[in-house]
Amino acid sequence: MDSIASTSGARWLFAVSILARLPLAMLSIALLVHAEHLTGSFAVAGAVAGIYAAALGVGGPLLGTLADRRGQTAVLVASAGAAAALLVAMATLPDGAPLAAPLALAAGLGLATPPLGACLRTVLPGLLPDAASLRAAYAVEASAVELTWIAGPPLALALGALWSTGAVLAAAGLILVAGTVAFAVQPASRRWRAEPTTTRARGGSLRSPAMRTLVMVLTGVGLLFGAVEVAVTAAADALESTTAAAPLLALWGVGSLAGGLLAARRSRAGRRGPGLAAILGALTLGHLALVPAAGSMVALGAVLVVAGAAIAPAYAAVYAMVDEAAPAGTVTEAFAWLATAVAIGAAAGAAIAGAVAESAGPAVALALGGAAGAAALLATAVRAPTLVTPVALAKG
C-alpha cells in the first residue's frame, strides 16, 4: 500500500474507483434476483444476467477507445449517467413487464457501464514514481477489487431482503454515478491524454502481439474462474450443504486478497514472461489441488485459500505489461480488452463446468478449472517471445 500512498492523487483515485466499482460487483446477482421477481422465471432472469455480461464485454473496449481518443472525463460522466438512468428504469419496471424490456435495459446497461478499472490503471503510471511502485499498486488494486466481489453479492441480497430488489438497483446507480464523477473530476483523470499517434491502424490495441498474448492468458484465467465457481457450488451441493458455497467462494477471495498484498510487498515478482509463467504455474497447481479436496468441506475451504493466493498476483503481472505492450494511443482500450477476456472466459467456463458437473461430478468440473489454468500457462510459454520486448513488438 505504500506505493499508492506515495501521492495523494493516487490514493484518492484508488479509493473512489473502488467505491464506484462496488455496484458492479452487486449487479450480477441483483439483476438476476430482480428479473426473477419481475418475471417469475429463473430462465428469463438468467438470460437478463447473461445479456448484461455479454454487453459489458462489448461495451468496455468501445468506451475505452473513446477515452483514448477524447479523454476520460466526458466518457466516464456520460456513461455513468446513462448506466444510472438504465438502472433506475430497470428498478421501476412493473411486475409482468414485457420480456423485451428487462432484456433491452440489461443490454444497454452493459454497453454503458463506465470502464473505471481500465481508466484507473491507465492513469496510475503518471502518478507513481517508478515501475516497482506501479507493479505494487496493480497488486493492491487487484486485491481491493476482490473485496468488492466478496462484499458486493451478499450486500445486494441483504439490501434486497431489507428493502426491495428494485431499490438495490436504484441505489447501485446512485453510487455508480457519485463514484464515477468523483473519479472523473480529479485532475489526474481530467488531464490524462493518450500518447499521441499520427495513425491508428486497424485492430486497435489487439494489433500488438504482446496484447494478444495477454488477452489469451486472461481468457484462460477467466475460464478457470467460471469453472471453479460453478464446481465449488456443485461440490457443496453434493456434500448436502448448498449454503456453504458462498463462504467457500469468500475464502477463495480472501486467498486472492492475501496473495495480492504479499505481491505488493514483493513488487519485483511477475516481471515479463518468466515471472508471469511462475505465477500461472502456482495458479494451476493450486486449483488442481482442489480435485482431491472435493469430498471434504474443510479441505475444500483450506485449499481454496491457498489456490486463490495466486489470483491477484496474476492480474498484477499482466497489468504491469500493458503500458508497454499496447500500441500508442490504445492503453485504456487495452485494459478494457483484458476485462472482456476475463468476462468471456468466465462465462464459457461456467457454462462448460455446469454441464460437466451434472454429468461427471464436481471433482471433474474442478479439474476443468485446473486445465484452464494450464492453458493460460501454455499460452504464456508458447508466446513468450512476444512478452520479452513488448515495446519493440507493439510500437515498432
Image (spheres, grey):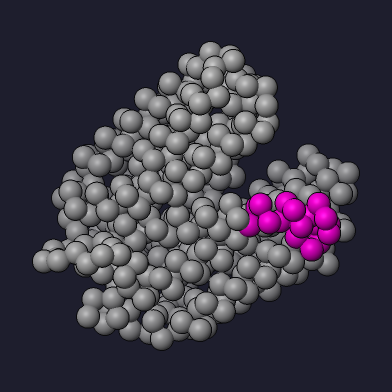
Number of numbered callouts drawn: 0
Q: Residue furthest top?
A: 94
Residue found 45% across the figure and 29% down from its top:
105
* Residue positioned 57% across, 76% down in the render: 377
Q: Residue furthest left?
A: 198
Please tell me whether the stretch drawn in magenta is mainly helix, strand or loop: helix
Residue 219: image location, x then y, percent: 52, 63
- In the rendered image, the quadrant that contains the C terminus is bottom left
Q: Quick check: 159 left or right of 40?
A: left
The N terminus sits in image quarter: bottom left
Q: Point out residue 197 in the picture as x, y percentages from the top left corner.
A: 14, 66
Q: Measured from the top left, where is residue 20 in percent x and y?
A: 40, 39
Vertical arrangement, residue 351 with respect to residue 2, above or below: above
Question: Residue at 44% of width from left, 45% of height from top?
Answer: 56
Work out whether 266 lies above or below 72: below
The front one of 199 and 140 is 199
Work out whether 149 lies above or below 215: above
**Residue at the image position 31 percent from the left and 37 percent from the top:** 79
> Residue 152: within the magenta?
no
Q: Is residue 203 visible?
A: yes
Is residue 152 visible to the viewer in this orientation of the structure? no
Q: Which residues are magenta?
A: 349-365
Which residue is more in the foreground, 16 or 372? Answer: 372
Image spot of residue 32 (x, y percent): 60, 32
- Kindly indicate the quadrant of the structure image that contains residue 19: top left
Relative side of 134 to 44, left or right: left
Dividing the picture into quarters, in which one does residue 85 lie? top left
